[in-house]
Image (cartoon, rainbow, N blue to C red):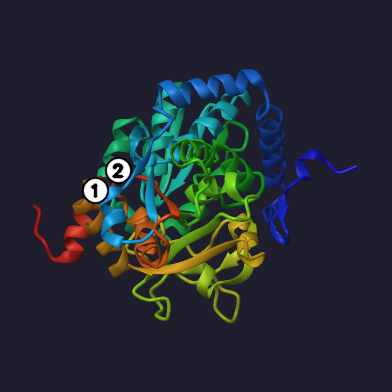
């Protein structure tokens, strides 16, 4: 009989637990707790209450009339995760994981963060439950996201700038895993994306799937049918897998991921894992990874601190190989133009991450019929990125 902890560890060939034995033991305890509580009525009632009264869910599904008219094709709806507490989708997953941590008796929380939104969400939840919190963030990303560092500190968390490697998200993940390996007894590692060793890809998917469940209910109420396409950006892939989850078995719904082409998918400066990556092992999982011919993980680049990651979640790798989802690369220039376009047309300033999804919609919606429906997940608000976009455009804001 299969050990229930090992069920669904893989999506096809992708996933697994490529970590040292001591970490594997700790991860299997986390997996056992997750499997125990995910269907527990008391656990789910507590989580539902927090999502409603602390986080402010459900988030709206907004018909973007001006963007729709501008593009001249399908009707465009925006799933407004930017209106979730703290301005991003990250809290959905953090609240679920921190409730598991509390039930496991953990007193210390650690996390990695790229753009800072996951770090802010983790710091806030740790403050809410009175837990010690430490966040690892690449030094380059620290420089790009000073506002979010201040927010994490304000919430009582300690932020550790990571100086190794490329000093971005990949290195923050490695530093957090190293910390976890040395503090297994009292520490719970809250992973922010649908990456890493099992059970994290499955657990993050589960807690982020509220995005897709709400979207399905809302679009049925507004349009009386399912959308023709769901678009979300993909770095590690948490908001995208959450957006896709409810529609994976609905073959008539196209699932479209927008990844970061950086300065061009055909240049060295990109994070287009699905376009340029190969199957390999990184950060405790088997998935698509940006690697050289010697299987060395390559640096990733994007204007977006949340997308400069050289890997991707194992379920996205599986969806790519089975042709259930499509993945397209968006350049920095295209993302910045989309950032400006949505701001001017709809009065909604998206994150640079979400701007990649908006840019993909800009490319494909004009070629669709006007009676078709597209949902784009706006995973967060763009306050954190305004200074960076201004710098990119050569505008002085100080």
Residue of label 1:
346
Residue 9 rendering spot, x and y as whole percentages: 72, 49
When the figure is inspected, residue 94 is found, relative to residue 281, above or below; the finding is above
Q: Is residue 332 left or right of residue 133?
A: left
Q: Secondary structure at mark 2?
A: helix
Residue at image location 37% in from the left, 67% down from the top: 363
When the figure is inspected, residue 371 is found, relative to residue 149, above or below; the finding is below
Residue 365 rendering spot, x and y as whole percentages: 39, 62
Residue of label 2:
148
Q: Secondary structure at mark 1?
A: helix
Q: Is residue 157 left or right of residue 246?
A: left
Residue 130 rendering spot, x and y as whole percentages: 44, 22
The N terminus lies in quadrant: top right
- Specify few, some or many for label 1: CA neighbours under 10 Å numbering under 14, 14-19, or 20 or more: few
Residue at image location 31% in from the left, 51% down from the top: 351
Residue 143 visible in rendering: no
When the figure is inspected, residue 184 is found, relative to residue 255, above or below; the finding is above
Q: Is residue 265 left or right of residue 155?
A: right
């Amino acid at each position: 009989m299969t050990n229930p902890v090992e069920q669904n560890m893989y999506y096809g060939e992708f996933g697994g637990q490529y970590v040292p034995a001591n970490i594997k033991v700790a991860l299997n305890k986390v997996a056992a707790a997750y499997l125990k509580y995910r269907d527990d009525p008391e656990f789910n009632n507590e989580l539902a209450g927090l999502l409603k009264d602390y986080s402010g869910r459900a988030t709206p599904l907004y018909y973007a009339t001006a963007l729709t008219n501008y593009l001249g094709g399908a009707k465009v709806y925006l799933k407004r995760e930017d209106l979730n507490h703290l301005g991003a989708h990250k809290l959905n997953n953090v609240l679920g994981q921190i409730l598991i941590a509390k039930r496991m008796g953990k007193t210390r929380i650690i996390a990695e963060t790229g753009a800072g939104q996951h770090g802010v969400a983790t710091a806030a939840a740790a403050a809410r439950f009175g837990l010690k919190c430490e966040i690892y963030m690449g030094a380059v990303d620290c420089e790009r996201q000073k506002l979010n560092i201040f927010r994490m500190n304000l919430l009582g968390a300690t932020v550790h700038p990571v100086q190794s490697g490329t000093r971005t998200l990949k290195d923050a993940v490695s530093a957090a895993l190293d910390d976890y390996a040395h503090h297994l007894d009292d520490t719970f590692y809250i992973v922010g994306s649908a990456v890493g060793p099992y059970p994290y890809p499955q657990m993050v998917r589960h807690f982020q799937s509220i995005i897709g469940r709400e979207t399905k209910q809302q679009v049925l109420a507004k349009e009386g049918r399912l959308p023709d396409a769901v678009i979300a950006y993909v770095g590690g892939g948490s908001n995208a897998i959450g957006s896709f989850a409810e529609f994976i078995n609905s073959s008539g719904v196209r699932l479209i991921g927008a990844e970061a082409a950086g300065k061009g998918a055909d240049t060295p400066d990109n994070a287009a894992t699905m376009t340029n990556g190969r199957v390999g092992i990184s950060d405790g999982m088997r998935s698509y990874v940006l690697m050289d011919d010697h299987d060395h993980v390559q640096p990733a680049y994007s204007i977006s601190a949340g997308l400069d990651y050289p890997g991707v979640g194992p379920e996205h790798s599986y969806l790519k190989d089975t042709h259930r989802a499509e993945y397209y690369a968006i350049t920095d220039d295209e993302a910045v133009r989309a950032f400006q376009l949505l701001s001017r047309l709809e009065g909604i300033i998206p994150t640079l991450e979400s701007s990649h999804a908006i840019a993909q919609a800009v490319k494909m919606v004009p070629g669709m019929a006007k009676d078709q429906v597209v949902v784009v997940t706006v995973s967060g608000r763009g306050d954190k990125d305004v200074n960076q976009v201004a710098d990119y455009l050569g505008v002085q804001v100080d």
